[in-house]
């Protein structure tokens, strides 16, 4: 876990900080410092421009543009069918957008494969938690870390080189235990993930996503099907992570939850961004109210 | 083997749900499998005793059984990598076996520089071990070529592609154009419908390679005489020796696949099986993992094919009908997909009971009840039922055991699917990691252990 708190973003250009971060890393030789550093490299890690996605004749996302600020918690809301999940899928590479661009930390990531997007530090969770059911919680966690030597088949199989795999595995295992403790699901470590309750699955999914060392997390309805006490815990964890410098984009149906917890809200309707702003601004927007009541939006 | 070591430090006091009873030798998979195989041998020896087998027949029976156990266990292990780990529905196993043995045959058959007589052809005359390596590589490359387009397909379409490929392989082998061709002065080819004579005996080549032939012949003569095997004891001991060689290969397969499975690599394969999209979202390039895993499995299927057919002296394309593919699937389902130990057990049980068992049983019954005259038609067998005489039907059934074998397999399969879809060893917790994932407190140094304990008491959820 990176313990470094976020500094005030000073650099205007997204890319300007990267070389600095690299040299810092060499000098300090501390992964945590590097992580904290990389998180203040730009003010706008995610920029979506003119995003459009058609499925046959249906336009699911119709020219959506928005920017997410560094270290913020942004809520993406809208009625069913507004295109929230499709937007998510276009950002994370599950769908290739018909038009428009997605930029992450100054790089164009439009149309990259999901694994490539994830490897750049933009990691998602799923609306229905997609834990790996017939693997234990601990296995789920062990899967996530990047750059595992043992993922090369020959290193895992051949004698002599296997030592380094085991060594790394021991380190990863320790990280996984720490993360499980942070989310307080360590008592479930040896349980099959499929046996977890809905809320515990959400915790597991978030914990697993964090082990990939992301800089930004996209959470697709993280509170759906989670009981109130677990929801509170999940929120606490998210706030704690945000204080550590992670950026969040959250899709959620529960308006109250979003209003109370996000400092910035994007409202989508019929594939387009209806409005965005602070919770107070959004609340006063008549269009938003109408959209949620299912009426036609018009002035 | 990791399982052995896993069981050795078995009794972690609070390792949750995992299977940590107190340690007994029975916890070791190797012990279970050895016991199973010895039990099967004992059963066959008993059956042979009932049949009034002499020593020669008993030894031959055991030798053939061990060859079958070895082959089916190896094939089930290779399929387990595809299906049990990665979730790839490969029903083209026989195609990869054919590629393996045909490549080996072409490489290692005796060189023919003059045009061979009709119905026969030569090879490149390479040593058998080179031919085997060539065959394995050919199967792996072929698997890779199949995988490149096929792995993009959904699971069910992938299955159709694999079975289609295995039939394409068989029809290609029948092709007369490449029955006999001249390449770089050597006459070779795939033999077309008449197949290929394999002029290399793997057991002999093995003995010759180690210079043991003379010693072996002398040994088998002496031992044969003592055991009363009768004249020409060598073929009997050849079968036994080949069964032994296959067991050595089987142990190699098992260790390789245990290592593959219990590694970060195997973990990603399992994750692909569970949910490929979620695995991608964690930054894993799932296609690369799938192709590698598929190629490894195909290489092993090729090797099993080489070992199976090389001993038979000749191959024809007819031998490569899809039937064997489904035998391997049944073996894997019996044993339990997802478990390497289960794959070996399934292969052994399948070979002993379903593949060889029915004929053996038939022989025993017919031998015991000499007077049992089976009716020659089904009608004659059924009609006495009305007179409450089931004997003709039973006799008829037993007489046709060879044909009923497939029916029997089908019944076993349906029963398993209903009552125990996870097989003998499926659904065990076998966490994919090169190290043992015991409870954390055990691996922590003593100094920090106390702090750790405080942080993660079993209640976990209640302290906020």
Image (spheres, coloured by chain):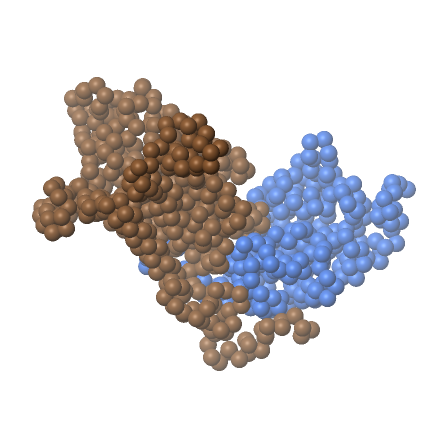
Give the color of chain B as drawn.
brown
Location of the N terminus of chain A (image quadrant): bottom right
Give the color of chain A as drawn.
blue
Question: Percent x, y for residue A289?
Answer: 87, 49
Q: Quadrant of residue B433?
A: bottom left
Q: Is residue A243 visible?
A: no
**Which is more toward the observer, A213 or B221?**
B221
**Which is more toward the observer, B164 or B126?**
B164
Question: Percent x, y for residue A153?
Answer: 40, 51
Residue in the picture at 40% in, 48% down: B346
Q: Quadrant of residue A102?
A: top right
Q: Is residue B452 visible?
A: yes
Numbered circles on residues, count? 0
Q: Residue furthest front?
A: B387
**Which is more toward the observer, A193 or B142?**
A193
Residue in the picture at 31% in, 19% down: B176
Residue in the picture at 67% in, 54% down: A219
Location of the C terminus of chain A (image quadrant): top right
Question: Percent x, y for residue A32?
Answer: 55, 66
Question: Percent x, y for residue A5?
Answer: 64, 68
Left or right of A218, for residue A298: right
Vertical side of B357 occupied by A181: above or below? below
């Amino acid at each position: 876990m990176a313990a470094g708190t976020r500094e005030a973003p000073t650099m205007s250009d997204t890319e300007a900080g990267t070389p600095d971060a690299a040299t810092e890393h060499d000098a300090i030789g501390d992964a945590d410092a590097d992580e904290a550093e990389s998180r203040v490299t730009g003010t706008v890690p995610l920029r979506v421009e003119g995003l459009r996605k058609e499925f046959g004749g249906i336009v699911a996302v119709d020219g959506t543009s928005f920017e997410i600020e560094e270290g913020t918690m942004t809520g993406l809301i809208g009625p069913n069918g507004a295109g929230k999940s499709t937007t998510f899928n276009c950002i994370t590479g599950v769908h290739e957008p018909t038009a428009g661009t997605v930029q992450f930390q100054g790089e164009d990531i439009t149309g990259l494969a999901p694994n490539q997007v994830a490897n750049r530090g933009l990691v998602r969770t799923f609306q229905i938690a997609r834990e790996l059911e017939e693997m234990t919680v601990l296995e789920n966690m062990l899967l996530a870390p990047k750059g595992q030597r043992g993922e090369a088949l020959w290193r895992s199989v051949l004698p002599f080189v296997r030592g380094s795999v085991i060594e790394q595995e021991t380190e990863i295992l320790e990280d996984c235990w720490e993360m499980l403790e942070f989310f307080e699901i360590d008592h479930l470590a040896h349980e099959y993930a499929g046996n977890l309750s809905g809320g515990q699955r959400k915790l597991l999914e978030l914990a697993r996503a964090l082990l990939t060392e992301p800089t930004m997390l996209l959470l697709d309805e993280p509170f759906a099907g989670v009981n109130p006490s677990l929801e509170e815990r999940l929120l606490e964890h998210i706030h704690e992570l945000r204080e550590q410098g992670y950026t969040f984009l959250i899709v959620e149906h529960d308006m109250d939850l979003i209003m109370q917890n996000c400092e910035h809200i994007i409202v989508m309707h019929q594939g387009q961004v209806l409005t965005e702003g602070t919770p107070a601004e959004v609340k006063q927007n008549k269009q938003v109210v109408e959209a949620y009541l299912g009426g036609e939006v018009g002035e | 083997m990791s399982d052995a070591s896993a069981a050795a430090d078995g009794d972690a006091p609070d390792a949750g749900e995992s299977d940590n009873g107190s340690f007994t030798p029975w916890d070791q998979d190797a012990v279970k499998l050895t016991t199973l195989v010895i039990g099967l041998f004992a059963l066959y020896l008993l059956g042979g005793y009932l049949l009034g087998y002499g020593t020669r027949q008993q030894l031959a029976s055991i030798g053939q059984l061990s060859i079958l156990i070895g082959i089916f266990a190896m094939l089930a292990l290779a399929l387990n990598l595809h299906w049990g780990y990665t979730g790839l529905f490969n029903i083209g196993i026989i195609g990869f076996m054919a590629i393996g043995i045909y490549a080996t045959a072409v490489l290692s058959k005796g060189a023919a520089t003059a045009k061979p007589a009709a119905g026969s052809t030569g090879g490149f005359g390479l040593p058998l071990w080179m031919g085997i390596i060539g065959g394995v590589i050919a199967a792996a490359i072929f698997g890779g070529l199949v995988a490149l387009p096929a792995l993009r397909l959904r699971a069910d379409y992938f299955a159709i592609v694999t079975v289609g490929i295995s039939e394409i392989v068989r029809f290609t082998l029948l092709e007369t154009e490449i029955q006999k061709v001249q390449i770089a002065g050597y006459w070779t080819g795939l033999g077309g419908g008449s197949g290929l004579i394999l002029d290399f005996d793997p057991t002999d080549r093995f003995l010759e390679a180690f210079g043991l032939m003379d010693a072996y012949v002398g040994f088998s003569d002496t031992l044969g005489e003592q055991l009363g095997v009768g004249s020409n004891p060598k073929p009997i001991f050849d079968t036994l020796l080949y069964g032994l060689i296959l067991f050595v290969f089987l142990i190699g397969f098992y260790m390789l696949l245990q290592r593959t499975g219990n590694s970060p690599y195997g973990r990603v394969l399992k994750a692909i099986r569970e949910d490929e999209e979620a695995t991608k979202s964690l930054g894993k390039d799932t296609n690369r993992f799938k192709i590698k895993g598929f190629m490894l499995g195909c290489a092993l299927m090729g090797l099993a094919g080489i070992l199976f057919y090389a001993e038979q002296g000749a191959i024809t394309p007819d031998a490569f009908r899809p039937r064997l593919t489904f035998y391997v699937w049944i073996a894997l389902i019996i044993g339990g997909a997802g478990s390497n130990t289960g794959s070996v057990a399934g292969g052994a049980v399948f070979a002993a009971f379903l593949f060889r068992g029915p004929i053996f049983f038939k022989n025993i019954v017919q031998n015991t009840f000499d007077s049992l005259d089976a009716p020659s038609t089904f009608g004659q067998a059924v009609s006495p039922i009305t007179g409450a005489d089931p004997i003709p039907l039973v006799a008829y059934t037993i007489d046709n055991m060879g044909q009923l074998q497939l029916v029997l397999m089908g019944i076993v399969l349906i029963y398993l699917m209903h009552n125990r879809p996870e097989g003998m060893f499926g659904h065990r917790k076998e966490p994919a990691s090169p190290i043992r994932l015991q409870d954390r407190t055990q691996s922590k140094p003593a100094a920090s252990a106390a702090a750790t304990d405080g942080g993660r008491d079993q209640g976990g959820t209640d302290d906020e």
